[in-house]
Image (tube, helix red, strand yellow):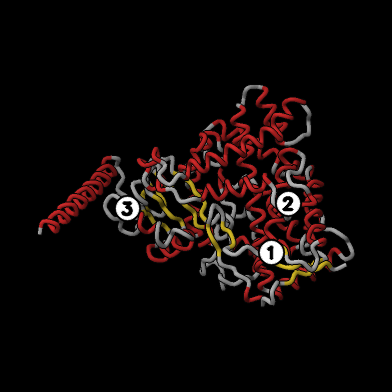
Amino acid sequence: MGLWASEACIALILITIHVVFVLLKYTRRKLDGTSLPLPPGPVGLPLIGNFLYFIGPLRRNPHRGLACLAEAYGPIVSFRPGTAKNFVLVSSPEAAREALVANDAGLTARPVADNARALAHSAGSVFVLPGSDPLWKKHRITIGARFSGRSLNVTRPMRDRNARQIAEHFRACSSREVSVGEALMSTALNSVSNVLFSKDVVDAHALGEAHVFKELVVKLTADTAKPNISDAFPFLAPLDLLGSRRSFSRTLDKFYKLLNAEFVEPRLATGEKHDDVLDDILAQYAKSQLTHSDITKFLTDMFVAGSDTSALTVQWAMAQLLRHPDKMQKVHTELAANLGSKEFVEESDLVQLPYIKAVVKETLRLHPVTPLIPREVVSDDMCLGGFHIPIGTSVFLNVWAIGRDPASWPQPEEFMPERFLGDRAVDYRGSDFSFKPFGAGRRVCPGLDISARFVPHLLASILHKIDWRLPNGMAPEDVDLSDNHRTNLDLATPLRAIPMFIA
């Protein structure tokens, strides 16, 4: 009886605390003059909220688990992992439009994961700083000046060279099984580094091999995605119980030092000019508008965000084409009809390759590299779908679920690039919120324009005059299309295939 009484007492205390918490939250909303309800969602336990759900169904692939929550509770769902602030999930085109258009000004911040606080990185990160921060505005102006419009036309020869290099690499590997993602990652890194520094970071003759720069970027991406109990229970953050922040700090410190030693310090010492992003930010540094730390954090963000995402999208596209030989044949037919005997694909050729572009869009619909786009509420009077969204709430746009919404997409699970041709030639920046792989509004992905050019260019380059085959007697239906959500949406099984050069 004594043990039972103790357990009953503890349970009663926890229930009392939970009831008091709910009443206080309700009272606070009434005092604020807010009569709208919070969005529906799963009932949480006292103190820990919905934390058990996050270490269960949501641990490996949260985009899928959260899509199931939306099916149960509707397109706008609220939940609370641990003692952290509330999360709100947006999972329909209509709700996405309301969030990113009508409420864009109130969603200009992003939630900060505990790992991102390593070495104070979040204090200078363009991807974490709130939209009202002067440093964020400076960085976005720099990105806008170099990653869109006329400036991209100026840097086109660099991307043509990078695309040619990977085509030559796979042709040289003819009849040998290769890791498709390894070479793609190297080429994507070189593409980003050319815009930033006007030079490659990976040797063009070793695209498929290990490289310290590439390894550090991959490690940074992996460390960013490591589960961290401090995000669910912020009061535990000083203890760093899982060592996630310490691990991220070590990798980040190595990358900072590499960037400074290889690029920043030599440019400062020589004063050379290359008309690139580094020139732009060093000019701001000379005017005391940026600190050395600001520069390092900005360059780190550009590498981590710009390289992994492009490489993954092309790898997903290749996996789908190998799974669907009829679609692969359409790609080869288009390339042959429009490029003929031309040896390599150039960016200017893309205007003649609508099916390649449709393949990329269909790939992003099914496998958006960032399946959950995060925002944070900065307004204290936000209303979304008739619900009250309190200030400080983390709002996640589930673009993976929206891209598979049967109300918007017939046969949503099928790989059908043809749906992006003709009447539905949807644009990344268009008004159709059933297709927003790069987000929208003030915090739209800053690399949208360069990605829209480079990804189809890269895909066309590794398919032109190359016939791809599956290894070990695999059939098309054996290609593994299961995913694994780390920081980005990765293939659970890295793609391996055999390129066959067609002279």
Sequence-first tag of 1 and 3 = 3
Judged left or right of residue 6, residue 63 is right
Which residue is tagged 3? Answer: 49
Q: Residue at x 32, y 53 (%)?
A: 49
- Residue 284: percent from left, percent from top: 66, 27
Which numbered mark, 1 or 3, is in the foreground of this view? Answer: 3
Judged left or right of residue 469, residue 481 is left
Which amino acid, by three-letter code, is at mark 3? Gly
Binning the other alpha carbons within 10 Å of mark 1 as few (below 14), some (14 to 19) or many (20 upward) gives many
Task: Give the spatial CA distance, label 2 vs label 3.
Answer: 44 Å
Binning the other alpha carbons within 10 Å of mark 3 as few (below 14), some (14 to 19) or many (20 upward) gives many
| SS label for mark 2 | helix
Which residue is tagged 2? Answer: 187
Q: Is residue 328 above or below residue 392?
A: below
Q: Residue at x 73, y 41 (%)?
A: 195
Which amino acid, by three-letter code, is at mark 2? Thr
Q: Residue at x 69, y 51 (%)?
A: 210
Which residue is tagged 1? Answer: 358
